[in-house]
Amino acid sequence: MHTDQRLIERIQEQQAWAFELLYERYAEAVRRQLCYIVGDEPAAEDLVQETFLRVWTRAGQWNGQGTVKGWLFRIATNLALNHLRTRRRRPEQPLELPDTLLEDDELPDTPAWLVDSASLGPEAVVEQVEQGTRLRQIIGELPEEKRELLRLVHQMELSLREAADELGIPEGTAKSRLHYAREQVKRGLQAEQE
């Protein structure tokens, strides 16, 4: 099995097989991270492609510090934050249908194969969004060191040891911080439900 370090070295030599292997290894985790940050599946998919394009074109910038996975997630996070800043400056406007198409009898019937029967109803979607918002708010109120540790372990899927290395702290400290962070989130969610 090729280590991440070895794959980056081969990508620096423009070896496509190494790039494909790194992509297979991390694309899904990067997509989840980006979806969490931007909250928009199509935008996240575009950002995954942009992230790995950066890895291919700028692999020479890898300095060997930290983990390759951490470097990859920093690239993705920076791209996501740039995307959010751009979206704030130039918000997208919803596509308006002409008034002539708003009559029920003028709208074409939607074929059954186009309807996702597994999709959530409006109430469930609203509840899911509200829960996500509450969770982000609770996590946002945590001290920075606990918030960053949660992000590394749960979003970036680093092991506790990898996260501790990334933060430059002993593994025992990371374990303690993670425990207290989870407890604070749990108490915050329980308080919301009461």
Image: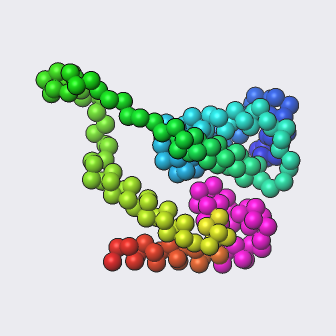
Res. 149 image quadrant:
bottom right
Q: What is the x, y in percent for residue 152?
A: 65, 60
Q: Residue at x 27, y 48 (%)?
A: 121
Can you say whether 175 is above or below 31 in the image? below
Q: Quadrant of the C terminus?
A: bottom left
Res. 117 image quadrant:
top left
- Main SS of residues in magenta: helix
Can you say whether 110 is above or below 186 in the image? above
Q: Is residue 13 left or right of residue 110?
A: right
Q: Is residue 126 magenta?
A: no
Q: Residue at x 32, y 43 (%)?
A: 119
| Residue 25 shows up from this direction | yes
| Magenta part of the chain | 149-176
Q: Residue at x 67, y 70 (%)?
A: 145
Q: Is residue 109 left or right of residue 43?
A: left
Q: What is the x, y in percent for residue 7?
A: 79, 40
Res. 60 image quadrant:
top right
- Looking at the image, which is closer to me, 73 or 87? 87
Colour convention of the picture: rainbow
Q: What is the x, y in percent for residue 174?
A: 70, 73
Q: Residue at x 85, y 50 (%)?
A: 64
- Looking at the image, which is closer to me, 3 or 109? 109
Q: Quadrant of the N terminus?
A: top right
- Looking at the image, which is closer to me, 22 or 163? 163
| Residue 31 shows up from this direction | no
How many marks the image carries: the answer is: 0
Q: Is residue 152 magenta?
A: yes
